[in-house]
Image: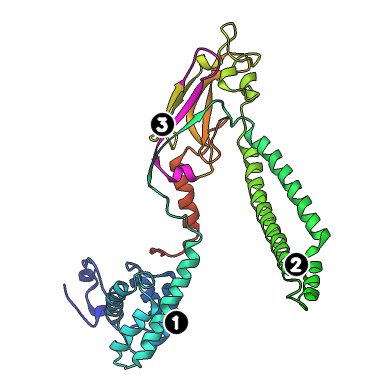
């Protein structure tokens, strides 16, 4: 290791044998910003601190600081970050512009007002807190890993044709809500009641009960209006989801008649009769198996309960795993349902389970089953929003 002020005077043959050359010296003003962005990479800083480096650079102009000085300033600033992070972990967990500015003031031996320094630090912490709140709304909420053990008992594949039926139900309910809203607006009773109250309040003692009743009626109408509008908004959101699933989650076209007609397991035969000894028992020959490419493979088991007589045929899905899977409105691929097809031949179909809607369904393709693909998709989305090469918090 060696040092020299006139590197250009060293013999080129000797210089070529150096493993590494490090320049230590003053930086030109236009070089400061780039150097700061380079040396700050290993540190945990907030995104808005990175953006603030351009403004911070202005504080260094004309100070004849070397690259070693800048490196020391960033190192000392990180120590300040560690100090303030202990006191304010939510708003000062990463390096803020004020940390760099405070160290620079010490380096330049300036003595700013203590109150101003404190105000500047608080302003940076508030700015970071606001930025973080805005950023966090685009992140997935932490998943509830609480262990849950429960059972879902099914007497049929009740998810067959589910989204078509749900689509009709939503349309009917929306039409009903629209009629109620139209009636409320046409009657326009609130202005009328309010006008009547103006007159009644001129002699409140005489009409005390009437005034109270009319006020209650106004409150009722307003609450009813608010409830109907909220329900309408909720239904329209669900309608979009249902339309999407009707389009993307297609059912097999070769389902046997008793499955297609949504008959219970007790009536799995050609004519949908309640079981007797002379009819085909499609549930007897059916089998259900989980597969290892299901997200729920480790958490679910099947229990088939069969009764040789009227009633008593059930398929039980036993779940023992994280709570968050049960809170997601998704049709999870579970595995194979080996049941009869339209020609009454035993055929493998893809069995799906929705824990929110409590449905068992059969679809042509596997849905919500690939953990690796979902993780890669999320990573791709996040990477698309990153344009700097350090951690963003």
Q: Which residues are magenta?
A: 305-327
Provide the secondary structure element on which disc 3 rests. loop
* Residue lying farthest to the right in this orientation: 186
Q: Residues within 10 Å of mark 1 (few under 14, many from 20)?
A: few
Q: Residues within 10 Å of mark 2 (few under 14, many from 20)?
A: some
The residue nearer to you, when weighing 92 against 100, is 92
Of mark 1 and mark 3, the one earlier in the sequence is 1
The residue nearer to you, when weighing 63 against 119, is 119
Residue 262, magenta (yes or no):
no
Q: Which residue is mark 2?
A: 210
Q: Which residue is mark 3?
A: 292
Alpha carbons under labels 1 and 3: distance apart: 54 Å
Of mark 1 and mark 2, the one earlier in the sequence is 1
Give the total number of marks visible in the rendering.
3
Q: Residues within 10 Å of mark 3 (few under 14, many from 20)?
A: few
Q: Which quarter of the figure has residue 191?
A: bottom right
Direction from residue 267 to residue 22 in the image, left or right: left
| Residue occupying image coordinates x 65% and y 38% | 246
Q: In the rendering, at what x and y percent does residue 377 appear?
A: 49, 48
Q: Which residue is mark 1?
A: 55
Colouring rule applied to residues? rainbow
Question: The N terminus is located in which quarter?
Answer: bottom left
Vertical relation: 39 (above or below) 153: below
Vertical relation: 335 (above or below) 94: above
């Amino acid at each position: 290791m060696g040092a020299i002020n006139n590197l250009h005077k060293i013999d080129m043959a000797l210089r070529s044998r150096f493993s590494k050359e490090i320049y230590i010296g003053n930086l030109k003003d236009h070089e400061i910003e780039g150097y700061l962005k380079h040396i700050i990479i290993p540190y945990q800083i907030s995104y808005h601190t990175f953006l603030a480096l351009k403004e911070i650079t202005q504080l260094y102009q004309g100070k004849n600081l070397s690259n070693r000085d800048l490196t020391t300033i960033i190192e000392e600033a990180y120590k300040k970050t560690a100090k303030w992070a202990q006191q304010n972990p939510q708003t000062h967990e990463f390096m803020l512009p004020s940390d760099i500015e405070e160290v620079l003031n010490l380096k330049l031996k300036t003595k700013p007002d203590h109150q101003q320094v404190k105000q500047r630090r608080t302003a940076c912490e508030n700015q970071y807190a606001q930025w973080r709140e805005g950023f966090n709304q685009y992140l997935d909420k932490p998943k509830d890993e609480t262990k849950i053990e429960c059972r879902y008992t099914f007497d049929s594949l009740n998810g067959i044709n589910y989204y078509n039926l749900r689509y009709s139900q939503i349309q009917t309910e929306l039409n009903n809500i629209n009629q109620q809203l139209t009636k409320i607006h046409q009657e326009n009773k609130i202005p009328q009641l309010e006008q009547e109250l103006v007159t009644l309040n001129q002699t409140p003692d005489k009409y005390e009960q009437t005034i109270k009743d009319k006020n209650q009626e106004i409150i009722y109408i307003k609450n009813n209006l608010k409830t109907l509008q909220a329900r309408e908004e909720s239904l329209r959101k669900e309608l979009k989801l249902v339309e999407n699933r009707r389009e993307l989650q297609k059912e097999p076209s070769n389902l046997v008649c008793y499955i297609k007609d949504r008959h219970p397991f007790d009536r799995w035969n050609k004519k949908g009769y309640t079981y007797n000894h002379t009819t085909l028992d499609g549930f007897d020959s059916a089998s259900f198996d989980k597969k290892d490419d299901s997200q729920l493979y480790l958490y679910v088991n099947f229990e088939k309960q069969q009764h040789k007589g009227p009633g008593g045929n059930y398929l039980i899905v036993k779940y023992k795993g994280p709570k968050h899977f049960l809170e997601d409105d998704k049709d999870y691929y579970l595995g194979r349902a080996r049941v009869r097809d339209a020609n009454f031949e035993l055929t493998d179909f893809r069995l799906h389970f929705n824990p929110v809607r409590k449905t068992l369904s059969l679809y042509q393709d596997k849905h919500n089953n690939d953990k690796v693909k979902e993780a890669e998709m999320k990573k791709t989305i996040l990477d698309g929003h990153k344009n700097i090469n350090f951690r963003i918090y």
